[in-house]
Amino acid sequence: MLQRQDELRHLVQYNGNVEDAPLLTTAVVTTLGALLLSRAPLAAVAVALAGTVFSLGMAVGETPFVLFLLADAGVGYTAATRPRRVSVSAAALCFATLAGYAVWDLTRGDFFNPSAPAGLASTVVIAWLIGNTIRQDRAHTDTVRAQVTRQAVTAERLRIARELHDMVAHNIGIITIQAGVGSRVMDTQPAETRKALDAIEATGRETLAGLRRMLGALRKGEEESAPLEPVPGLAALGQLVGRSAAAGVRVEVHRRGEPRELPSDVDLAAFRIVQEAVTNVVRHSGTRDCTVTVDHRGDELAVEVVDRGRGGSVGGSGYGIVGMRERVGLLHGEFSAGPLPDGGFRVAAVLPIPVEAGR
């Protein structure tokens, strides 16, 4: 370029090379539009429309249509990335330009063909609709992502609440029973009193340690994993039996089937169900023994806690039965709890084991 005499004049005037002015106009409009689009989309659309008007009457008749399509692209981008009032303003610029062209053409007295402006107006509508659809889809995706995040946070809080209830309710129940035993035998059986106080101390330390773990988990950021370690499972039944025996309730454990490694959520849920049921026996049943049955079946795990105490209602103001039912429901299992016909109370749960976990 710039090799001919008066090169710039040839580029901008219509009677030079017929391709010079259209190419230069298109290049300038495209460059300016690309520079302005991300920061000032309305200005980018205005530049494309100005180029369209400037190119009217050039020898290459397709140039105005190409530049108007660039304005359409700006409208679509604006509708996809900017608020609706901005994108509507961009589309209005295009319609105003088409209306101005129609008025100008009519005032010239020439034959006016409305098909060209109408077709270009339809491209503006299509570009705006496409961009607006993209913006709505993006907004919907963001909303769904935010809802999923909130649900995850809520589920984590519920999990921690269940863990807190199960641990504190069980341990405080043991402490209460031991304190009652100690107060009754304080004067007559000092050795039993000391044993009760030792059990209270041990259980209290365990409760404090668990509370510290949970508070540490709550202090962690939402993006971090916050496991409540150590996570108990059916392997901790021995400790549960020992604490219950110290509280004056003998727990007899029966195991059926072939024990195998369980998914962590199933293992934890099974232990918490047994723990809560045994806690209810210690606190409410009035009996001195209960039976725990753990049955490893082919594709499911069944746990059952039965006592021969006073029985009682499944309802009530406590959250123990509700929490157990919720745990089982989250794992798509079956749960039942209620008094037995001949006295006592039974809690039973069947937890499905995923096929891949059972292999």
Image (cartoon, rainbow, N blue to C red):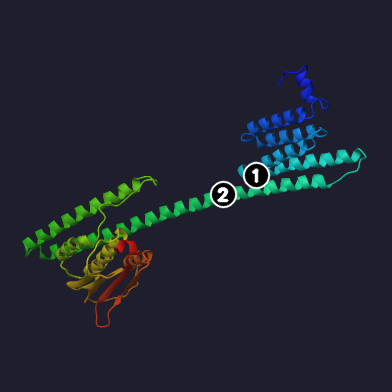
* Residue 157 placement, left or right of 73: left
Asked if 193 appears above or below 89 in the picture, the reply is below
Q: Looking at this rendering, what residue extends furthest in the top direction?
A: 5
Residue at position x 76%, y 39% in the image: 65
Question: What is the x, y in percent for residue 325?
Answer: 35, 68
* Residue 336 placement, left or right of 7: left
**Disc 2: which residue:** 139
Asked if residue 354 can be seen in this view, the reply is no
Nearer to me, 60 or 312: 60
The residues tagged by marks 2 and 1 sit, at their Cα atoms, a distance apart of 12 Å
> Would you say the residues marked 2 and 1 are in contact, meaning their CB atoms lie under 8 Å apart?
no
| Number of numbered discs overlaid on the protein picture | 2
Callout 1 crowding tier (Cα within 10 Å): few <14, some 14–19, many ≥20: many
Q: Secondary structure at mark 2?
A: helix
Callout 2 crowding tier (Cα within 10 Å): few <14, some 14–19, many ≥20: few
Residue at position x 23%, y 54% in the image: 207
Question: What is the x, y in percent for residue 134?
Answer: 61, 48
Residue at position x 28%, y 70% in the image: 298
Q: Quadrant of residue 154?
A: bottom left
Residue at position x 25%, y 58% in the image: 232
Q: Amino acid at mark 2?
A: Ala
Q: Quadrant of the image for the C terminus?
A: bottom left
Q: Which mark is residue 79?
A: 1
Question: What is the x, y in percent for residue 273?
Answer: 28, 66
Q: Amino acid at mark 1?
A: Ala
Question: What is the x, y in percent for residue 268?
Answer: 28, 60
Q: Quadrant of the image for the N terminus?
A: top right
Q: Quadrant of residue 161?
A: bottom left
Q: Earlier in the sequence, mark 2 or mark 1?
A: 1
Asked if 168 appears above or below 112 in the picture, the reply is below
Q: Secondary structure at mark 1?
A: helix
